[in-house]
Amino acid sequence: MDSSVVIKQSGIEFGTSGARGLVSNFTHEVCFAFTLAFLSTQTGVKRIAIAIDNRPSSPAMAKACISAAKSVDVEVDYFGVVPTPALAYAAQAACLPAIMVTGSHIPFDRNGLKFYTKTGEITKQDEVAIISSSTHFDQIDLLPLPISDMRAFNLYLKRYIDVFPANLLHSKRIGIYQHSSAGRDLYPDLFKALGAEVICLGFSDEFVPIDTEAVADSDREQARKWSEEYNLDAIFSTDGDGDRPLLADETGEYFTGDILGLLASKSLGIDALAVPVSCITSIEKSGYFKKVIRTKIGSPYVIEEFDNLKQNFNSVAGFEANGGFLLASSIIIDNKKLLQLPTRDAILPVLAVLNLAGNFALSGLVESLPHRFTFSDRLKAIEKSKSKSVIERGIYEVDELVADLGLSHLKLESKNSTDGLRLSFNNGDVVHLRPSGNAPELRCYTESDSLKGARELSSITLNSVKTLINEIH
């Protein structure tokens, strides 16, 4: 069998963060092919690190990846179920390439593979090299999963316990919404080590596809109830693989990911940022940063900008609207060095924001920012071709699309097609439509001068898109 042929026929594609697709398409042969193709693009590899999330399909996929590596005499450090940034940090420390078996936030009938070279996340050029690699293999002998190595778990804990004060969360009552997160066993240990009283909430034996960009109304209501019931100072959670955070204040209201990243960057003293075009405009309006570069959506595009920024600024970072925080340069916290970790991380932005708040309520932090509000939602089960037809209509017939979306009462100021279609209106409202890179969904990001306004924009737009798609097709 030829890896490039197997991958091409599998229906698996690279999205904004790794190769994603239906579990039924991630056969042993496909996982084998991806692993061998990836290894063939790396030079002198004798060892690789592999970890998984809590999806039902992840252990079987890991077996195939491990078996593939060993079939070409590459040894494997298997870290079991840990957050993606924990695997990335352990691999970085040991100068190893790595594979994370995870579908992040997408439904459990889907999964994915995320690849790291010795220097960090693969680039878009690396993706092309992987799917183009013509590596031959014949018989597949599946090996059993090794016993999990705890080094990645322990290193990730130590990363933050060593730099943040041991009393950082003293007298704080922190709820940890565990659900099926890959870090659900790690987070209570971390928050307790930093002085918090921890209340574990919502543990689930079934996989829960938490999307930090489109938090379900039921999850929002649950957070408010938990906050009141347990008298919490904050609630912390993540998506499935623990690289995108959720942080709720003392009232149970969740921060949006870009506001969390903005506040975290202020707390950490970041000079320059790379952020996707979908993030809130408060980042520039705040005046906290010397330079802000806007990119396409996806961590590889954010990472691409880091080298240029590091030539001119001492502290560089990036974050996404989903809250994942990427630290491009090592920084000093409480006179201690925190090493760079240029991949999405859920822990650093949350600890940084809790540190910024100190003894004051988290809700007060937002009051110091320009009063802009974002909201995001999505239409599920929308084929990418249908989403693209809506985007293309906006690019070539933008006035007609604005009318079709029920937004003709607003005056269009500009459009941006860097990633999807971003419409900016003269009253400051923003509507951004974009096909998901990971699932058959059409995402809608909105911004307004009130949360109610942002929600209404989203509702009007997505309801109109449903009608438009039916008319087009």
Image (cartoon, helix red, strand yellow):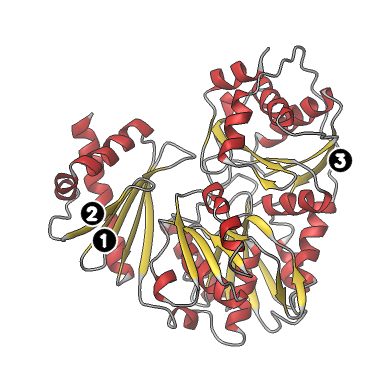
Q: Which residue is mark 1?
A: 456
Which amino acid type is shown beneath numbered disc 3? Ile
C-alpha separation, residue under disc 3 versus residue under disc 2: 51 Å
C-alpha separation, residue under disc 3 versus residue under disc 1: 50 Å
Q: Position of residue 311 (x, y in %)?
A: 61, 62
Which amino acid type is shown beneath numbered disc 1? Glu
Residues 97 and 232: in front is 97
Residues 191 and 258: in front is 258
Query: Is residue 422 something one can see in this rendering?
Result: yes
Which amino acid type is shown beneath numbered disc 2? Ile
The N terminus lies in quadrant: top right
Instruction: Pick out the residue farthest to the bottom.
Output: 359
The image quadrant that residue 217 belongs to is: bottom left
First along the sequence among labels 3 and 2: 3
Q: Position of residue 402 (x, y in %)?
A: 18, 50
Q: Which residue is mark 2?
A: 460
Residue found at x 74% / y 41%: 98
451 on left or right of 406: right
Q: Does residue 336 sit above or below 302 in this rendering?
A: below
Residue found at x 69% / y 79%: 169
C-alpha separation, residue under disc 1 versus residue under disc 2: 6 Å
